[in-house]
Amino acid sequence: MKTAVLLIASCFFLLFVLTTFVPFPGAIQEAHAAGFDSSDIANGLQLTFERRFFFWGATLLELGLLCFLALTGWSRRWADRFLAWPHLGRIYAVLAIGLVYLALHEVLFVPLGVARWYHARAWGMSNLDLADWFRERYLAYGINLIGEVIVVVGFYALLILLPRVWWLIAPLGLSALGIAYAFLAPIWINPLFNTFTPLEETQWRHQQPRVQDLIDKAKVPVQEILVMNASRQSNHTNAYFTGFGPTRRIVLYDTLLKNHTDAEIESILGHELGHWQLDHINKGILLGTLAALLGCFVLDRCLLAAIGRAPWHLHSIADPAGLPLVMLLIFLGSWITMPVTNAVTRYFERQADTASLELAGQTEAFIAAELKLAKVNKSNVAPAPWNVWLFSSHPPTVERIRMAREWKP
């Protein structure tokens, strides 16, 4: 067991060194060629470098906490205590262990979160004061807690009731929850954090005809085009598509509308419409279901192997003492699959970029929008290829600009 822990820790330490300290000079030359000046490149590299310490600090804290809970016999002792309480069944014992984990997690992560907030303020990347930051953090925390309770209860109910075939059914349940979240988030969850106003009711209402023409050209049944008051939180500019079925909508940041030309907005909107044209939400859910099926099968094998073995001494795969082990395996599995997941999302983003060029037909506006987005958001426009491979859900800005310049109608 000690050997396994040391191997895992060594792998994460090597990744930390590689992704934080090893430069790639060729990327800087490419960024200059794409149209970025030295200050743009330096700002993006410096901000990314500093953020890496927060990211890896959080990653190592999470790994350390999960290893402590899963690999030291702690979970066996606490599960036995909870199960010894009168009328406390396995589901309630699992939830009790989960609450202990959450309490320890908050003790460790609140100071790091506050430090991240100060850092974002220092770089001009956050407009929230500390009170608003705490309010949003714990509002999101409460929403996530509800979702996590549903997942944990459903997961252990399957382990208890269908121990032989749970891994075949769980992916379908996760997909159903994903669809439900995609359906409900635009109408119940997102409005808790921001105000969403129909485009025709804002100061940018003159954009409505251009936007509607582009939507009609794309032949996408969009329910609404909304403007989000993103400037309340930061100066970050963006747009996104959200929802499922009758709740589908496109959201434009107010910062985007303030800082970009009409043609640039049209180009960015074309990208979001491209996601819908290419049915990326449904494809993502299908691929996620297949990945979950493989992951649940591996998890089932691991839980079976932990029955009666130190340090877990599980009595069955549904033993509440196995929860920290499940969480550790999911954490490690997410890292193992991260390059594949990001490769798929980068492929989807490239497809949406091509769709934007085909819909809007404005190559120069596309390039200008990418340049402006990267500068305003202080993006790293000269990432090392190994960082892109591991972390990037979108193609590098330089690659997107090069694609636009080479694109032919």
Image (spheres, helix red, strand yellow):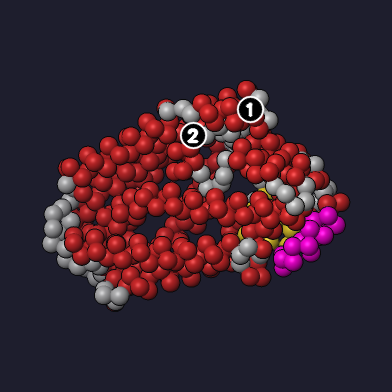
Question: Is the residue 337 above or below the residue 112 in the image?
Answer: below
Residue labelled with disc 1: 32
Where is residue 367 drawn, in percent x and y? 71, 40
CA–CA distance between discs 2 and 1? 15 Å
- Please indicate, yes or no, whether residue 314 appears anywhere in the rendered image: no
Horizontal arrangement in the rendering, residue 265 relative to residue 244 (left or right): right
Residue labelled with disc 2: 384
Asked if marks 2 and 1 touch (Cβ < 8 Å), the reply is no
Residue positioned most to the top: 38
Horizontal arrangement in the rendering, residue 168 relative to residue 379 (left or right): left
In the rendered structure, find residue 83 and report the number of the disc placed on it.
Answer: none
Which secondary structure lies at badge 2?
Answer: loop
Where is residue 395 drawn, in percent x and y? 57, 44
The residue at the point 27 percent across, 42 percent down is 8
Magenta stretch mostly in which secondary structure? helix
Which secondary structure lies at badge 1?
Answer: helix
Where is residue 174 drawn, in percent x and y? 44, 67
Magenta residues span 208-223
Q: Is residue 310 magenta?
A: no
Horizontal arrangement in the rendering, residue 91 relative to residue 386 (left or right): left
Q: Quadrant of residue 94?
A: bottom left
Q: Please, what is the three-letter code of the amino acid marked with disc 1?
A: His
Residue nearest the viewer, comparing 173 with 391: 391
Q: Please, what is the three-letter code of the amino acid marked with disc 2?
A: Ala
The residue at the point 50 percent across, 54 percent down is 344
Residue nearest the viewer, comparing 360 with 90: 360
Question: Is the residue 20 above or below the residue 366 in the image?
Answer: above
